[in-house]
Amino acid sequence: MTEVAQQETQKEVDLTAANQILDKYQDMHGALMPVLQDIQEAYGFIPEETVHLAAERLNVYASQIYGVLTFYAQFHLEPRGKYIMRVCMGTACHVKGASRIAETLKDRLGIAHAETTPDLKFTAEYVACIGACGMAPVIMVNDGTYGSMTVQKMDEVIAKYKNMD
Ligand code: FES
C-alpha cells in the first residue's frame, strides 16, 4: 500500500470501537491479548492509535504492546485487504506452477507477498502447504479453496471477487 493511502487510513481511525473494547475488559487481569484480538476483529488490523490508547488505558508501555504484536503472527499492524489471496507455495503446488499463479496475481492486481491493493480490497500472501496437494496448484481466498489453478482460472477468481463488495 502506498504511503499516502496509509496516511489516509490512519487519519480516519475512529477510536470509538477501541474504547468500547477497552471498557469491556477494563477490570480484567491479563486483558491485553483479548483486547488486541478484539481490536483487530473490529478494525481488520491494529491501528497505531489503538496501541497508544490501549497502553494508556491498560497502564502498560506501548513498547510492551508492540512486543506482543510482533511476536504473534496473527496480528497485523497494517491495513489488509478484505480478500486475502493466499497462494500455496508448497512443494506440490510449486511443481505444478505456483509461481505462475503468483505472477498472475502480481500482474493483475499489482500485489506480491504481504502487499495490499490501495483500495484495501486484496492482500496477497504466499503460504506453505495448505493440505490440499491433490488439487495443486491451490489458492485460498479467505476461507474458500480453489484448486487446479491456471492463469485463466486466476482471472476468473479475481474477476469474481472484484465484482463483490
Ligand atoms: S503444496 Fe500446495 S496444498 Fe500442499
Image (cartoon, rainbow, N blue to C red):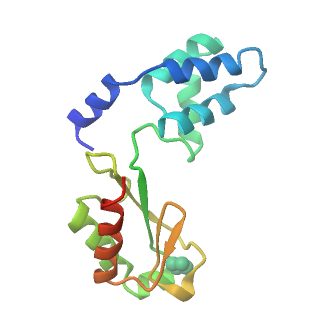
- Describe residue 83's horizontal placement relative to residue 17 as left or right: left
Q: Quadrant of the N terminus?
A: top left
Q: Position of residue 21 (x, y in %)?
A: 62, 23
x%, y% of residue 127? 48, 66
> Residue at coordinates 57% horizontally, 11% vertically from top-left?
56
- Residue occupying image coordinates x 47% and y 81%: 147
Q: Is residue 90 left or right of residue 164?
A: right
**In the figure, is residue 75 to the left or right of 98?**
right
Q: Is residue 158 above or below residue 14?
A: below
Displayed quadrant of residue 41 = top right
Q: Residue at x 58, y 40 (%)?
A: 71
Residue 161 image point, x, y percent: 36, 62
User: Where is 159 relative to 121, above or below?
Assistant: below
Q: Choose top left, top right, bottom left or bottom right for residue 68.
A: top right
Q: Position of residue 64 (x, y in %)?
A: 59, 24
27 vs 48, nearest the viewer: 27
- Total numbered badges shown on the rendered structure: 0
Residue displayed at 49% across by 81% down: 91
- 59 in relation to 38, above or below: above
Name the residue nearer the viewer: 51 or 156: 156
